[in-house]
Image (cartoon, rainbow, N blue to C red):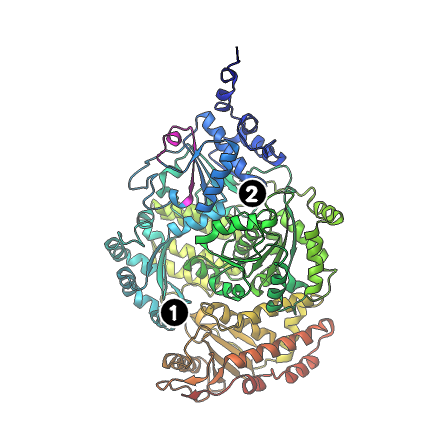
Amino acid sequence: MPLNLSKLSSTSLLDTETSPREIFNLLPNKHARYKYPRDVQTQVWDRWLPRRAERDLVVKMNTGGGKTVVGLLTLKSCLNEGVGPAVYVTPDNYLVSQVVKEAGDLGISVTTDTGAGAFLQGKAILVINIHKLVNGLSVFGTTDTGVKIPLGVVLVDDAHACLSSTESQFTLTVSDGSAAYKGLMQLFRDELLEQNDTKLLEIEDGASDQEMLVPFWAWHQKGLQVSQVLTEHRTDDEIKFSWPLIKNHLGQCRCVVTGSKIEVSPRCLPIEAIPAFTEAKRRIFMTATLADDSILVSDFGARPELIEKHITPNVANDIGDRMILVPQEIDPNVSEAELKAFVKKKSAHYNTVVIVPSDFRMKFWADVADLVVKAENLEAAVDQLKATHVGLVVMVNKYDGIDLPNSACRILVLDGLPQARRSYERIETNMLAGSAHVIGRQIQRIEQGMGRGIRANDDYCVVLLMGSSLTRTMFTMGAKEMFSPATRAQLKKSLEVAEQLGGGVDELDSAIEVCLQQGTNWKKVAREAVANIGYPPTGTVRPTAVAQRVAFDNASIRNYAQAEDALQKVINQVAASESPGVVGWLKWQLAEYVQFTDAVRAQQVLKGALLLNRRLTKPIDGLDYEKLDAKDMQQANNVVWAFKPYAGKKTNLLVRLNGVLDDLAFLPDNANEFEAAMQEVAAFLGFKAQRPELEFKRGPDVLWAVGNLRYFVIECKSGAVAQKITKHYANQLSGSMDWFGQRYDHTCKATPVMVHPYRVLEAAASGHAETRILTTGRLAALKDSIRAFCTAAASSLETLDAAQVQKLLEHHKLTAERLLETYTEAPMHG
């Protein structure tokens, strides 16, 4: 008589056991590769199990540490305990398919159907992207509808990547040409005109690289009219998914106007608009080893005291082998064209993936790319890379959400800094330029990108970081300390490699091959680099993020005094440790909340904020302009003082210089970067500079003080595409000269300078009599001379004196007098 093995099975135990490790061992149909759980997975499960009832938990594991398996078994444990339904949330559909595949290989029941009976009954895990959960018409319910599908446990995988989609869902966007756009523009035109008339006129002319923030008092005073405009169009396709999420929080929203769209977004995400998420019994946030968990509090509404007690493996050495090199740090003279040719050559032997921040930058690689990847062909491209040799593959803005294991990616290139996703993020980046807040956000995105090429601890990949903006950020004070412990260790070891290299791509090639050949000696060095690397004992949540969340939540229920109190307390707390710019930014937010109860005091608070940060909203009665002093300025002495901090750090100086000069390029949508570079390059030349339009909301884009009471009034048209200087541009420069005449007396002399690709005026334009044009060709020559001057000065930084600098300035024709006559030209009438 044959045995009936079904009567002896442990199926019931598989559905009742709560230890994820034991569930893993009980799975009867898992793929052969799942013989045992990894140590790091077991360590996480063992730490999660006794804390599983805590409502908000963060699990941190290195990229490639097996987070998906950890997440699936954790949710299976919850279901076995009776805590369901269970949802596994990913950033996008591609990752949904990856999780479903992994679940199939494990033999865990999952579904992507929100109406599936197995999911609703707690017998299968629902796998969805974040958009399915968070949108104004969510099948899980919103504030208007209430909870439609109650959830027991929600696991958000790659929480930082999910936030990008979540922010976009809570951002109401109306495009130019729509009735809602026209209605909002008409509503706030007067206030925007008062803030910055020149910028508004450019926006009305369609400039997509200019953004303006509607003043908070105007937004508050016209709240009813805003509601009327948006309510009238609430069923429009571009509004209907976000309107239900923010309509109850319009008073706490900010509005950004550009030439192509208007964005309305809340100060923090009112995540309670998705009550199924906020009322879930358990919420688990899985992240890579990123340092700052603040967004989990400020945007997902998690409890900070629980978020700080993160769950990690014992050590952080469960990471693949990465050699991380910055070619332009090793040799600042290596050009981007040389690097592109080098990368193309290597791609003949190794699958090479280049991640770029924009479609525009993608064009730089298009002539050598074997495959360009966008959303529509992402899954097919990744499958192709995993299956065969493809060559050089370019991906646009894919810093997260893809796995490229083993030979799918042996060389990973990150070219340029990830760009701000939303208009308000660009404004905030400008407000906080150079601060730890902005740099930390950028480093986080860079590290996300760097993790794409290794998916297990026996994987290996070379990572090349290039592009002036990225390289310059890496050299910012304290930037490298913002990486995770394991990445810092790999960076340190890679830097030791770099120090042994000479210049040129041949030396770079020899180092790369050491990693790619995986010789015994290198593998030993690579493993030792991360041996005994641990995780921080607690997570990091900035006190400012906690205060912002507390203020937002209190204001949402009209407890305005408590909202003010939360921000005032954190301002007092961080005043000594944060930069003046950050403290000013916090005071500006305080003014936003004061506006609810006292409009006069709000303006007073705003003025106090502007004393610390000139890049904020201008108050109703304007700003007092602060003059640039050019009377007793000594150009050569100023250069010596500017270069003094770089003594012994020649490479740092040249990397920073190259970053600034690379930003001086005629490109679309780079107005802010170009103007910032024009201000910064003045210091390399021994001049003083400011950005009056940005800092005081009136005046030219850039003003240089060049000595002896002489000034250059500069208007930058780096995004101009017309081959003639328009009447509008010419009038703008004339207006800036009038502005100068009203603020500086007759002893000061100004020369009007326009940066424009061409020097020909259109027929209707009449330029100022003394106008000079910095054209494409002259700009290139100026950049070459500045680079040559700084390189020569950098060769003797320790002994550099004013006499040497003066000779170099004269040789390269960079004194105030010679610069104008050599590198600019008079306009022509077409």
The secondary structure type at the circle numbered 2 is loop
Can residue 52 be seen here? The reply is: yes
Say whether residue 167 is left or right of residue 67.
left
* Disc 1 residue type (three-letter): Ala
Q: Which mark is residue 207?
A: 1
Q: Residue drawn at (47%, 58%), measured in percent from left and top?
A: 420
Residue 97, position in %: x, y?
46, 42
Q: CA distance from mark 1 to mark 2?
A: 42 Å
Find out whether residue 121 is within the magenta segment: yes
Q: Quadrant of residue 495?
A: bottom right
Q: Which mark is residue 488?
A: none
Q: What amino acid does circle 2 point to?
A: Gly
Quick one: 336 or 151, which is closer to the camera? 336
Look at 42% across and 30% down and name the residue there: 84
Front label number (1 vs 2): 1
The location of residue 429, given as percent across then percent down, is 48, 60
Q: Which residue is mark 2?
A: 539
The C terminus appears in which quarter of the rendering?
Answer: bottom left
